[in-house]
């Protein structure tokens, strides 16, 4: 069942992308020779209005084949026969429709369970944050130069960038007024396990593991779930946070019980003394309801969150902060969706479907961003050539452009094969 749902989500995301190209091509008078759902040999096919509509055997992918799209053909109804703005609109429509799909998915989630305001919940007494004037109830709007709209904006920033030993500027709203304070976080030596987790009401999932840290040395990986510490069961990220507050780690060995693939394991872990930049406040990660206008606003901010998070991920990949192992192909994506489905089933039908919609938002936003990257064979690469054509007043040599896109497609296929091989290997 989970594989079917994963295939359905991927299918919807890709079909919507191709439908964007299809719709704008039709609107601009471009002949669409075939609009296909799936890949491989045709199972069903019909022709209407000069377009062949096909259902193909492999339930992944799709295509929108336009007349003269990949060769020099400026005859009536071909892609190249249209003006530059029309061609740009057709190419950009695919990623744009992915963003539109993600936005409507976000509207469903925000209208049902709300959004997560970046509100300060608690400020540690005597901390630099408290001395700077930060108070519970403040709504954070900017942190260390980063705009903050949702609690997850702050969470993602802190977990990817971390706090530094430097002055931090934080802006917040209080009683409708904007305030800005500057403080230097407290530096402490603390025994730590070297991981991050989701501090929510859900089972505490390990989001990342510090290389060389205690959990990394014990063989625990991101995606595992903490079940108990020294025999004390923890059922949520909130309970785990409370446990660490009441039982500070020291240099003594602890027994950690974690879950992986439905099985539990016990491992002995010795916390490591670490120089730590202490965060002197807690902030909200829960969701609250909003008005109909708020649904529109926060759905757009939900989409923004996923786009920015995707761009940050690529930036960290290109700068070496994360490795190639963080990339997933179709097999890895199906596996992640399947895991999310299985884990959410116990929460009830509503939560399960909201989880699947959230996965669709994530994948659709990612596909939109990826396709806009200025790489050959992708929509972004084709847009680069169209923009250059507009600046030069004439197109680049069509044959040269075709060779560049072919080379880019070849490299992308090699990368996809490599990632798919690794994803399949990780399944066993």
Image: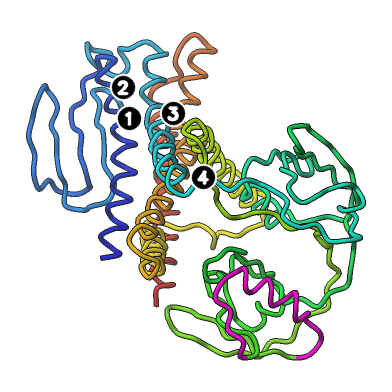
Q: Check disc 2 and report the residue beneath it.
A: 24
Q: Secondary structure at mark 4?
A: loop
Look at the image and say whether residue 270 sits in the magenta stretch: no
Q: Secondary structure at mark 1?
A: helix
What residue would you read off at disc 1? Answer: 20
Q: CA distance from mark 4 to mark 1?
A: 32 Å
From this view, report whether residue 81 is shown above or below residue 329.
above
Q: Image point 36% across, 23% down: which residue?
A: 90
Dot in front, 3 or 2: 2
Residue tagged 4: 289
Q: Residue 91 appears at what percent x and percent y?
A: 39, 26
Residue under the image location 22 percent in, 47 percent down = 38
Judging from the image, what secondary structure is the residue with disc 2 in?
helix
For residue 211, above or below residue 356: below
Disc 2 from disc 1: Cα separation: 6 Å
Q: Are marks 3 and 2 in contact (CB under 8 Å)?
A: no
Q: Is residue 381 left or right of residue 78?
A: right
The range drawn in magenta is 231-252
* Residue at numbered disc 3: 382
**Residue 127 falls left or right of residue 201:** right
Q: Nearer the viewer, mark 4 or mark 1?
A: 4
């Amino acid at each position: 069942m989970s594989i079917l749902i994963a295939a359905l989500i991927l299918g919807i995301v890709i079909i919507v992308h191709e439908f964007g190209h299809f719709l704008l091509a039709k609107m601009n008078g471009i002949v669409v020779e075939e609009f296909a759902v799936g890949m491989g040999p045709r199972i069903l096919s019909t022709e209407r209005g000069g377009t062949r509509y096909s259902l193909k055997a492999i339930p992944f992918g799709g295509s929108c084949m336009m007349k003269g799209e990949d060769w020099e053909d400026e005859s009536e109804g071909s892609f190249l026969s249209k003006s530059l703005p029309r061609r740009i609109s057709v190419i950009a429509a695919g990623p744009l429709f992915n963003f539109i799909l993600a936005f409507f998915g976000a509207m469903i989630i925000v209208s049902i369970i709300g959004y997560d305001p970046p509100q300060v919940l608690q400020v540690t007494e005597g901390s630099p944050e408290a001395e700077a004037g930060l108070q519970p109830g403040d709504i954070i709007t900017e942190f260390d130069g980063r705009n903050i709209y949702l609690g997850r904006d702050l969470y993602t920033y802190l977990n990817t960038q971390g706090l530094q030993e430097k002055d931090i500027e934080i802006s917040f709203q209080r009683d409708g007024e904007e305030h800005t304070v500057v403080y230097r976080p407290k530096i402490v030596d603390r025994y730590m396990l070297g991981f991050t987790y989701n501090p929510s009401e859900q089972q505490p999932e390990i989001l990342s593991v510090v290389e060389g840290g205690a959990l990394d040395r014990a063989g625990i990986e991101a995606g595992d779930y903490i079940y108990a510490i020294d025999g004390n069961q923890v059922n949520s990220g909130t309970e785990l946070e409370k446990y660490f507050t009441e039982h500070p780690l020291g240099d003594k060995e602890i027994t950690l019980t974690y879950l992986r693939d439905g099985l539990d394991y016990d491992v002995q872990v010795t916390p490591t003394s670490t120089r730590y930049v202490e965060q002197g406040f807690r902030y909200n990660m829960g969701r609250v309801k909003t008005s109909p206008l708020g649904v529109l606003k926060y759905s757009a901010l939900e989409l923004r969150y996923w786009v920015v998070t995707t761009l940050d991920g690529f930036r960290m990949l290109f700068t070496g902060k994360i490795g190639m192992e963080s990339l997933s192909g179709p097999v890895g994506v199906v596996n992640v969706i399947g895991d999310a489905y299985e884990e959410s089933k116990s929460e009830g039908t509503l939560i399960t479907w909201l989880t699947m919609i959230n996965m669709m938002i994530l994948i659709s936003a990612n596909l939109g961003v990826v396709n806009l990257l200025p790489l050959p064979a992708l929509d972004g690469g084709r847009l680069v050539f169209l923009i250059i054509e507009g600046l030069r007043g004439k197109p680049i040599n069509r044959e040269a452009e075709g060779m560049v896109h072919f080379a880019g497609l070849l490299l992308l296929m090699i990368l996809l094969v490599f990632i798919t091989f690794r994803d399949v290997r990780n399944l066993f």
